[in-house]
Image: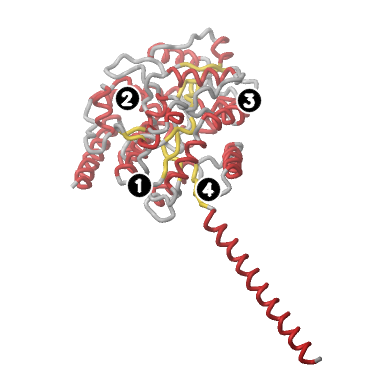
Amino acid sequence: MRRRLGRIFGVLLIVVMLFSLTACSKSNDVSNGEDKEKKVIKLFHRFPDEPFNSFIEKIVAEYEADHPDIDIVVSSAQNQPYKEKIKVVVGSKDCPDVFFSWSGEFSERFLREGLIMDLTESFNNDQEWKNSLLESQVNEYRSGDILYGIPFRLDAKMMFYNIDIFKENNLEIPKTWDKFIEVCEALEAKDITPISYGNQDQWPSSHYIGSLNQMLVDNDTRLKDLEPATGEFTDPNYLKALEYYQQLIPYFNDSVNGLPHDMARNNFAQEKAAMFFAELVEITYLAEENPDLNYGMFSFPLIEGEGDPTLLTGSPEGFVVSANTKYPEESIEFLKYFTGPEVGKKEVQEVGWFNAGIGIVEGLEDQKLLEAYEVIKSAKTMSGWFDASLYSTIANEYLTSISDLTNGDITPEEVMEKIQKVAEEARNTSSTEVE
């Protein structure tokens, strides 16, 4: 009897052990399988504010639901911290797979250094993708024939004006610079602040200078000077642009360099100023800050010069793919969806932004947004954001010097001396990099 019990116990013990081993093995297989199946794509953007961050999180969640093998890890930072952080991580092992990047020199430096992917072949070989986006906006993310990014939101600058203030003071929309100055003088005479302007972060000044440069400076010269290897900034019209900018300083609010851009926008929203040089993506902010604000928009006043007055100040803002991503095909596939028409239709309805998708405004009823979209869609060419188009050291010098010029601390001549010196240093650096 004891022997029988012993045998039975022994058999049971073996069965239990085998079951435990099998269970452990299956558990490990599942765990390892999940690790192998889940492809982690890191997404880094610069829109941490609401409702934009939640919108991106929602789009990511929807994509993950349709792609169970993909895990998208999202991180974000505000504008200025983002610029600083992405420059540090882009060449490291911590670089995100898909990340926000401005078109122009900001991204093209990454392209030259082999840090972001050339998307040309993938884009050209996918006719459905290629035909679903506005060509004029996609082209802003090209360097020569190389496509390196896809727009996520379209943007440009227009002068916003308070319709009621203009009507009450019998003012018409100024189409030329001289008429613009006359309007400013008339408003100033009535103790109305003509233009709300906040330059604490310095980049807003580049939108004024960029707009003036493109009207005054020959386009070939301007484009040549944007290249670090050939930039000189010796054309006298750059100086003239600064002098035109100086003409506006008496018509700005006080403490321009101490006021953040969003506070300047809020002052315009609260009708404390008659005009505001705004980005079209700010329409949704104005609707929140003052739903009853009666305002319109007009193009930057025309100046007769050697430049191209048809250029629209602005540029789409989009995303690029790291050249070092572990999952290039999956990252491109996500980028295609994230910046495509399906997301674009939701984007314009939910957060008031446009992407480059064709047909995204179907069903949109907001007249301000429709007007803004038409401005961008009808633009033959966009100039790019001036600060993002410049080599980093030249951009920094321009922003600092214009801030000093706004304070009255230096002259336009002194500004250009500084710019030309830094441009020479950039040329030398570029020639060294080529060697």
Most foreground residue, 218 or 179: 218
Residue 251's image quarter?
A: top left
| Of pointers 4 and 1, the one earlier in the residue sequence | 4
Q: Nearer the viewer, residue 45 or 426?
A: 45
Residue occupying the far top of the picture: 170
Quote the CA–CA distance across marks 4 and 1: 19 Å
Select label 2 or label 4 by which is in front.
4
Q: CA distance from mark 3 to mark 1?
A: 43 Å
Mark 4, residue position: 75
Instruction: Identify the disc placed on residue 290.
Output: 3
Q: Which residue is mark 1?
A: 115
Looking at the rendered image, the disc whose residue lies closer to the viewer, 4 or 1, is 1
Q: Secondary structure at mark 4?
A: strand
N-terminal of the pair, mark 2 or mark 4, is 4
Which residue lies under the disc numbered 2?
213
Between tags 2 and 1, which lies in front?
1
Mark 2 belongs to which amino acid?
Asn
Q: CA distance from mark 2 to mark 4?
A: 36 Å
Frontmost of labels 4 and 3 is 4
